[in-house]
Amino acid sequence: MFEGWRYRIGTWYARTQYRSKRDPVMRFNDVLSSAKRALVILPEVEEDLSAVQSTVRVLCDKFHRGAITIVGRDHQAHVYARQRGVEVVSYSKEDLTSFFLPRHELLQKVKKSTFDVAFDLNRSFTLSSAVLCRASQARVRVGFTKSYADEFYNFQIHVTPALSLTQAYATLIKCLEMF
């Protein structure tokens, strides 16, 4: 019944936590090409999962030298568990507070590694994914343009709503290839 209010309160809290923490100015052209460790946050919407598999495969190939960590819901993450060089962090509804924020234990799982780049593959704003991306402390945090994105991402990809999911993720890969 109060789910909308709880979500808004959680969003407000997360935005105020990160609003004062400014990112340093950086040149993106060498940061992405020299990145060794990546964090990939899977989309929470089921329809996005089938479209995102090729994108995750490309990211796994790009970061084969270092390591890649994939974060997703329990039913999503098991798909990537058997790939070499991939660490999987899965979470359930119980790992989120009543305000839809990640609990301390989930944040610690993400923070235990250092990341050069973090990718949030949700096309619309998802509070838990945005907070996990920001909490990763990656130098570059990549996400799609969406509500409240400025507080959580420092590299945003704009795709028109008319694009299919596959085209949107292909646009993400094309943007990354420029750097």
Image (tube, helix red, strand yellow):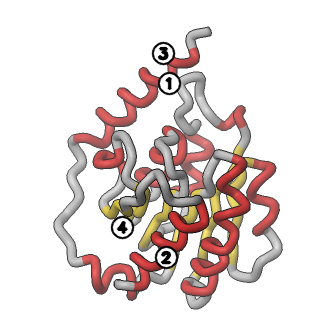
Please name the residue that numbered disc 3 is placed on.
Answer: 5
What residue do we see at 76% from left, 54% from top? 76
Q: Secondary structure at mark 2?
A: helix
Q: Secondary structure at mark 1?
A: helix
Q: Residues within 10 Å of mark 1 (few under 14, many from 20)?
A: some
Quarter containing the N terminus: top right
Q: CA distance from mark 4 to mark 2?
A: 15 Å
Q: Tags 3 and 1 in contact by the CB under 8 Å rule?
A: yes
Question: Along the line of sight, which residue is nearer the eye, 19 or 164?
Answer: 164
Task: Inspect the image, locate mark 2, and give the three-letter code of the amino acid beneath it.
Answer: Ile
| 2 or 1: mark nearer the eye | 2
Looking at the image, is mark 2 or mark 3 earlier in the sequence? 3
Looking at the image, is mark 4 or mark 2 earlier in the sequence? 4
Looking at the image, is mark 4 or mark 1 earlier in the sequence? 1
Question: Along the line of sight, which residue is nearer the eye, 21 or 30?
Answer: 30
Q: Residues within 10 Å of mark 2 (few under 14, many from 20)?
A: some
Q: CA distance from mark 4 to mark 1?
A: 26 Å
Please name the residue that numbered disc 2 is placed on.
Answer: 173
Residue 161, relative to residue 173: is it above or below? above
Give the image location of residue 106, x and y in percent.
61, 46
Please name the residue that numbered disc 4 is placed on.
Answer: 140
Task: Inspect the image, locate mark 3, and give the three-letter code of the amino acid beneath it.
Answer: Trp
Task: Inspect the image, locate mark 4, and give the three-letter code of the amino acid beneath it.
Answer: Val
Task: Inspect the image, locate mark 1, and give the three-letter code of the amino acid beneath it.
Answer: Tyr
Looking at the image, is mark 4 or mark 3 earlier in the sequence? 3
Q: Tags 2 and 1 in contact by the CB under 8 Å rule?
A: no
Name the disc covering residue 7, or none: 1
